[in-house]
Amino acid sequence: MFTKAIARKPGRSLICGITSAEGLGKPDYEKAVSQHEAYVRALESCGVEVEVLEPSEEFPDSCFVEDVAVLFAEAAVITNPGAPARNAEKELIVETIRKHYQTIERIEEPGTLEGGDIMQDGKTFYIGVSERTNQEGAMQLKSIVEKYGYQARLVPVCEVLHLKTGVTLFPDGFLLAGASFGNDAAFDGSVRHFVPEEEAYAANCLLVNGKAIVPSGFPKTLEVLKNRGYDIIETDMSEFRKIDGGLTCLSLRF
């Protein structure tokens, strides 16, 4: 169960965020603010108390707080983001994390790691090795979580930005995934459903206290999830999608 979450308001500099998206245009700031407020309400409806931090205009992508820390019951890990323009964002979150965690670990150079590449399922961490999270950073996190009794599986990430950009593992073993994760042995034993290419963005869902927060506008994926009986909350992510952001990116849950 999650009881708390940390989020950060988007700043006006959001329009300068890093993006690989083609044909979507630049984010509309006012609309992004409205969508972020709706996102926070969605978390609150799941029984989570959300601390909303003020925006940082210096860092256009800083509303994506998930990338700068990895949180689990025993400790917090301050990451070392692989995107040079985002690396200093990690220091923005430290003071807030210290209010909630006594034990704080760090990913150190030459390791790089972003929270979007980390997916926890019970006592197992799936660690994506991507353009943003290198092998060294992945191995550092593996060593950290193993100290606390967890196991870790490294997953190669290609074709998408982060691990969680392309995959969501539900507690019942259902795997919602993009095609690039079709044969990965790390997910052996799961029941896999591959999202259609035109709905690839819908592979990133946020699971909070028995509910699934999903991006609106992807009817085929929504139907699959409804047919499985999940308690679903839809929310519009159009403006954050324009700068490579997904549902999980916008908060740290613990």
Image (spheres, rainbow, N blue to C red):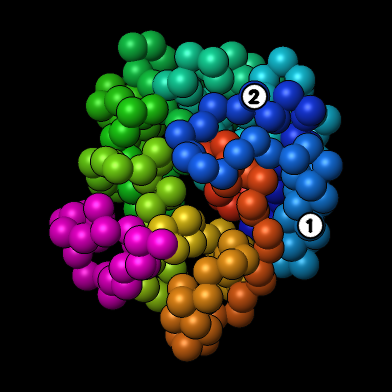
Residue pushed farthest front?
Answer: 23
**Magenta range:** 177-198
Q: Disc 2 vs disc 1: which is toward the camera?
A: 2
Q: Is residue 79 left or right of residue 1?
A: left
Label 1 secondary element = helix
Residue 54 seen by the camera? yes
Q: Residue at x 76, y 52 (%)?
A: 35
Q: Residue at x 28, y 22 (%)?
A: 136
Residue 169 seen by the camera? no
In the image, residue 20 lies at what x, y percent?
Answer: 45, 34
Q: Which mark is residue 38?
A: 1
In the image, is residue 202 above or below residue 98?
below
Q: Residue at x 78, y 29 (%)?
A: 11
Residue 101 location, quadrant: top right
Q: Name the residue tied to disc 2.
A: 16
Look at the image and tell me in which quarter the N terminus lies: bottom right
Give the amino acid type for the residue marked by disc 2 in the picture. Answer: Cys
In the image, residue 24 lies at what x, y percent?
Answer: 56, 44
Q: Which mark is residue 163?
A: none
Q: Is residue 88 left or right of residue 169?
A: right
Q: Is residue 187 left or right of residue 249?
A: left
Give the amino acid type for the residue marked by disc 1 in the picture. Answer: Ala
Residue 10 location, quadrant: top right
Tell whether position 194 is magenta: yes
In the image, residue 128 lies at what x, y percent?
Answer: 32, 40
